[in-house]
Image: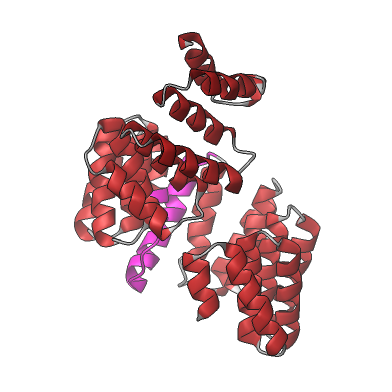
Amino acid sequence: MLIQHLLRHAPPRAALDAANEAVLALPEDARLQEALARASVAAGDLDLAVRAYGKLAAMQPGAPEPLLAQARVHGAMKDTPAARRAIQQALRLRPDSVEALAHLAQLEAAERRPAQALAAARRMQALQPKDPRGLALEGKLRLQARQWAAAETALRAALRLEEQAGNQGDIAADLHRALRAQRQDAEAERFASGWQRAHPRDAVFLLHLGEAALARGQLADVEPLLRTVLALQPDNPDVMNNLAWIGQQLGRSDALSLAERACALRPQAPSHLDTLALLQAQHGRHDEALVTQHRAIELAPDNPHLRLTLARIHLLAGDNASARRELERLDGLGDAFAGRPQVQALLRTL
């Protein structure tokens, strides 16, 4: 419980220190070994996470779950051969594991082996014909391959099974994507309206609609969708952060308070700190904004977008010399930085 509390409310290193201490006291406790692995991932110590999941797999020799978790860590480390070995070992333990086959399909897709990925999805369908996950995965793979009609067919079949099972997921969102990709705009709108009426509490679908509206630059359309999601998930810091960012663009009075709440719930998220810092600066709280933004940069030092916000904060504070230093540093990145046009536009104002 302490480790879980620290993972939610403290820097990840604090959770990892607690987990290491716990495992030292009780080295054969599987729950603590799993907690150590999760804390290691959160703290970015992926080598330790691999070892912890490996020990957990040895403690639970018939269970594929630790191996699949280990495969996810290998994937995060870009060690595809090790991820594949862990998945195949899980499948040897449980050849009918839909979860392991889903991992295999995702690995094959990431390796640009669409035929093998589709074969794994089809095997999921054969093993569990009433489980929507195999069809949903096929639909996602078809979307990635831009096979819109085939994606629609698979997703409609998955959705029928999903509704029978009474579950919620992102199948409806993928089907909506497939319809829009085929330029079936009227059908996409009809489907979206019907789905919202039948599933008014489906936050996943509302977030999908919000993302689609954001991609079209329709901020005013995104805001009510996100506010509905926040009413359904009042402690969701990501939704708060996105609402704060949109509120900053639209001049909403509660944008700053939303950003503060998001950072209170997730104090180690650089993107949330970035939003908060800019809003603090816009409210004249420049010293606070600089402290907040430097904390974000410490957490993600290789993210140039955070440096761009720092330059904006210096500009709002009237410190043009510091702003110029940051902007010239970013301009030196060249076209590798997608925000370079904004950098050059700000430099011209100086």
Nearest the viewer among 342 and 289 is 289
When asked about the image quadrant of residue 331, the answer is top right
Relative placement, left or right, of 36 versus 150 is right
| Extreme residue toward the left, this view | 197
Nearest the viewer among 42 and 200 is 42
Nearest the viewer among 124 and 144 is 144
Q: Determine the main secondary structure of the stretch shown in magenta.
A: helix
Nearest the viewer among 11 and 148 is 11
Relative height, residue 242 to residue 66 (above, below):
above
Residue sitting at x 65%, y 86%: 30
- Spot occupied by residue 37 in the image (x, y as percentages of width and height): 66, 72
Residue sitting at x 39%, y 43%: 276
When asked about the image quadrant of residue 297, the answer is top right
- Magenta stretch: give its range: 146-174
- Spot occupied by residue 305 in the image (x, y as percentages of width and height): 54, 33
**Figure label count:** 0
Residue sitting at x 55%, y 62%: 11
- Spot occupied by residue 67 in the image (x, y as percentages of width and height): 70, 73
Relative placement, left or right, of 245 versus 90 is left
Q: Is residue 238 magenta-colored?
A: no
Relative height, residue 143 to residue 18 (above, below):
above
